[in-house]
Image: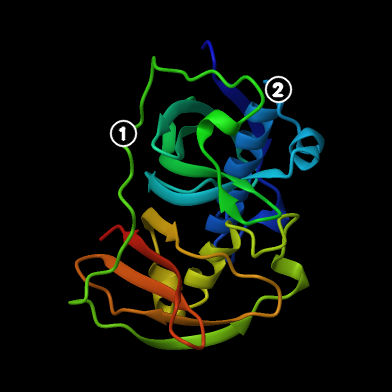
């Protein structure tokens, strides 16, 4: 398929929830791993990026699911770089089951950052070759996730970013934010949950030791909204879960 990257993965027991379904956070981790593999095989390995004080920072995900993978299911993830828009890099994903049926797809936005200065870099600063693929597109550039002022949010719980969630960039890994949202659901919601989509924008990184206040909405037309914010009220992320009726 030209400039695409494809990986297969068997869903293991440590990646599933109480319904034997792949956790949303684990699916996002697998997508991140596929994206890393795509970039690395074109020349930008992690060691080379570290040497240039560069890293990739995910800014927005818009994921659509027919269903989440199940225990012991072999899935195939295909991803590709779709070029740039302004300072951001576009990357799409398609996820297939063992019968080659598409079960999920996503459009994502990434920023190239200087890891020392925590500063977004222009795409022209990237020192390695990375070829865009234009023969397929999951959808348009994803919108930034911003929760309308009309949506009423209430406090759900508070957590502190600690060792288990921090990645090599020194902040809470992007996939863990899905757990923050899922942990805000009630037992009844989790029992009935059938996720149709997940949309999140990361407004500001969460570093180790920082406290996150997680807020959520009631279900509105099959959608639950979430926000993570600091003690002072600064936004870390806005997100929503789209649920099948």
On screen, residue 45 above or below 244: above
Question: Element at badge 2?
Answer: helix
Total labels: the figure holds: 2
Mark closer to the chain start, 2 or 1? 2
Residue 30: x and y in percent read 62, 43
Q: Position of residue 58 (x, y in %)?
A: 53, 49
Point 55% across, 87% down: residue: 158
Of 153 and 12, nearer the camera is 153
What SS does tag 1 mark?
Answer: loop
Mark closer to the observer (2, 1): 2
Residue 218 in the figure: left or right of residue 22? left
- Decide: is 203 above or below 216: above
Q: CA distance from mark 2 to mark 1?
A: 25 Å
Disc 2: which residue: 41
Residue 195 in percent (x, y) is at 39, 57
Q: Residue at x 70, y 22 (%)?
A: 41
| Res 223 seen here | yes
Pointer 2 and pointer 1: residues touching (CB < 8 Å)? no
Locate residue 36: give its quadrant: top right
Q: Which residue is mark 1?
A: 139
The answer to whether 57 appears left or right of 50 in the picture is left
Residue pictured at 51% horizontal, 26% vertical? 80
Mark 2 neighbour density, 10 Å: few (under 14) some (14–19) many (20 or more): few
Image vertical order of residue 142 relative to residue 83, above or below: below
Q: Residue at x 50, y 27 (%)?
A: 81
């Amino acid at each position: 398929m030209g400039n695409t990257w494809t990986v297969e993965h068997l869903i293991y027991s440590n990646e599933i929830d109480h319904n034997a379904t792949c956790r949303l956070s684990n699916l996002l981790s697998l997508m991140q791993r596929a994206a890393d593999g795509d970039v690395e095989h074109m020349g930008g390995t992690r060691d080379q990026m570290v040497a240039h004080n560069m890293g990739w920072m995910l800014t927005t995900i818009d994921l659509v699911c027919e269903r989440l993978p199940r225990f012991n299911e072999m899935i195939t993830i295909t991803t590709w770089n779709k070029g740039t828009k302004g300072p951001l890099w576009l990357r799409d994903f398609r996820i297939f089951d063992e019968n080659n049926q598409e079960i999920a797809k996503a459009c994502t936005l990434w920023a190239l950052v200087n890891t020392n200065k925590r500063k977004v870099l222009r795409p022209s600063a990237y020192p390695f070759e990375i070829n865009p693929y234009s023969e397929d597109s999951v959808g348009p550039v994803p919108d930034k996730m911003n929760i309308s002022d009309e949506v009423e949010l209430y406090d759900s719980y508070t957590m502190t970013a600690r060792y288990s969630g921090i990645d090599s960039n020194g902040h809470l890994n992007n996939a863990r934010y899905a757990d923050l949202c899922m942990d805000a659901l009630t037992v009844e919601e989790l029992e009935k949950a059938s996720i149709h989509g997940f949309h999140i924008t990361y407004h500001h990184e969460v570093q180790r030791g920082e406290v996150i206040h997680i807020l959520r909405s009631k279900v509105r037309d099959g959608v639950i909204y979430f926000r993570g914010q600091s003690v002072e009220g600064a936004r870390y992320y806005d997100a929503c879960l789209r649920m099948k009726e």
